[in-house]
């Protein structure tokens, strides 16, 4: 978690010192905006990965619970009939609920961070974020340009580690 916090701090510093050197036509998404978007996505992905790490720690710490049993319980999606079919105990159902609550809170936090970064880091109150996201789905040359920037962000991350 400390590594994630250092990375987020570095991202924030980079976004503050970024000068738009890559600026192009105002109607076109700039490389600087793509760079910021890529960094933002990296932070969000790290946060998502952290959820799994924390859940695994909670499962290991829970007496009587295994990863295999947790997956079996989680696959029921809180369906009473399915829970009965796998002979779920009351404590297992409560544990499953605790994990679901934990996940929900973390996902809500990620959505908040994503929204904040999209509006404050990528630009134009989130409109540029949406434009980038849409264009990545529909424009292969744009996606290729983005992938190149992602590679540079990943290389920078490896150096930081």
Image (cartoon, rainbow, N blue to C red):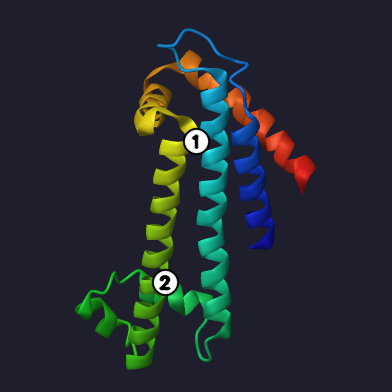
Q: Residue at x 35, y 28 (%)?
A: 127
Residue 21 in the figure: left or right of residue 118: right
Q: Residue furthest top?
A: 25
Q: Nearer the viewer, residue 41 or 84?
A: 41
Residue designated by label 2: 102
Q: Residue at x 50, y 85 (%)?
A: 65
Q: Nearer the viewer, residue 53 or 30?
A: 30
Residue designated by label 1: 121
Q: Nearer the viewer, residue 79 or 108?
A: 108
Location of residue 118 by image quarter? top left
Residue 107 in the figure: left or right of residue 2: left
Residue 66 in the figure: left or right of residue 93: right
Location of residue 21 by image quarter? top right
- Does dot 2 land on a helix, a strand or a loop? helix
Q: Is residue 133 above or below residue 28?
A: below
**Residue 39 location in percent, x, y?**
58, 37
What separation in Å lies between label 1 and label 2 (alpha carbons)? Answer: 27 Å
* Dot 2 alpha-carbon crowd within 10 angstroms: few under 14, some 14 to 19, many 20 or more: some
């Amino acid at each position: 978690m400390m590594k994630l916090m250092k990375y987020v701090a570095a991202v924030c510093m980079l976004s503050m010192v970024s000068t738009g050197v890559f600026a192009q036509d105002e109607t076109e998404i700039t490389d600087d905006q793509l760079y910021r978007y890529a960094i933002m996505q990296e932070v969000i992905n790290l946060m998502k990965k952290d959820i799994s790490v924390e859940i695994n720690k909670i499962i290991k710490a829970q007496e009587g619970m295994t990863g295999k049993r947790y997956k079996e319980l989680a696959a029921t999606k809180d369906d009473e009939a399915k829970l009965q079919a796998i002979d779920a105990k009351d404590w297992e159902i409560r544990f499953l609920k605790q994990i679901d609550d934990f996940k929900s809170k973390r996902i809500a936090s990620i959505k908040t961070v994503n929204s904040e970064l999209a509006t404050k880091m990528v630009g134009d109150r989130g409109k540029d974020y949406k434009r980038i996201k849409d264009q990545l789905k529909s424009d292969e040359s744009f996606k290729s340009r983005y992938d190149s920037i992602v590679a540079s962000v990943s290389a920078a991350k490896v150096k930081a580690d």
